[in-house]
Amino acid sequence: QVQLVESGGGLVRAGDSLRLSCAVSGPTFSTYLMGWFRQAPGKEREFVVGMSEIGIRTNYLDSVKGRFTISRDNAKNTVYLQMNSLKPEDTAVYYCAARGSGRSDFDAWGRGTQVTVSS
C-alpha cells in the first residue's frame, strides 16, 4: 500500500515562502495523479492543486494561482508544493494525496503538515 509523508510546514510571516515535500513509497509513483489539499480550522478540506502522472497537466485552486506551484520528481518519488507570497488565509494543515491508475478519487493520504502564516 502506498504511503505518503509530508514535510516542510512551519510558521512564517505574510509574504514569505515555503516549500512542502511529499515522499511517496512504492515503485509505481509515476502512475499516480498527485494532489495537495488543505484544511483550515473550522473549515472543510479543500483541493489546492493536482498534477497528472507525468506532470503535464495541473489544476489549481483559484486563490493560489500565480503563488503556488506543484512539481514532481518521479525519480525521487516526491511531489513538491512551492508556496510564495503566503497570506494568513493560507494557514491550514496541508495534505498530500495520490490517486492510483484507474481510480476515480484520491485514495491515499499523508498525515499532513501544518502551515501557519502570521500577519
Image (tube, helix red, strand yellow):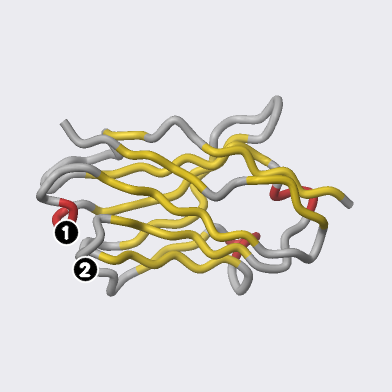
Which residue position is annotated with label 2?
A: 54
The circle drawn on residue 16 is none
Give me the residue at 33% from left, 64% from top. Answer: 72
Give me the residue at 82% from left, 59% from top. Answer: 14
Crowding at label 1, few (<14), some or many (≥20) Cα neighbours within 10 Å?
many
The circle drawn on residue 30 is 1
Give me the residue at 65% from left, 60% from top. Answer: 63
Query: How many marks on residues?
Result: 2
Q: Earlier in the sequence, mark 1 or mark 2?
A: 1
**Quadrant into which the N terminus falls:** top left
Farthest residue in the top direction? 42
Whether 98 is drawn above or below 13: the answer is above
Which quadrant holds residue 94? top right
Residue 21 position, x and y percent, is 44, 53
Farthest residue in the right direction? 119
Element type where label 2 sits in the image: loop
Whether 78 is drawn above or below 102: the answer is below
Amino acid at circle 1 = Ser
Amino acid at circle 2 = Ile
Residue 40 is left or right of residue 30, and the answer is: right
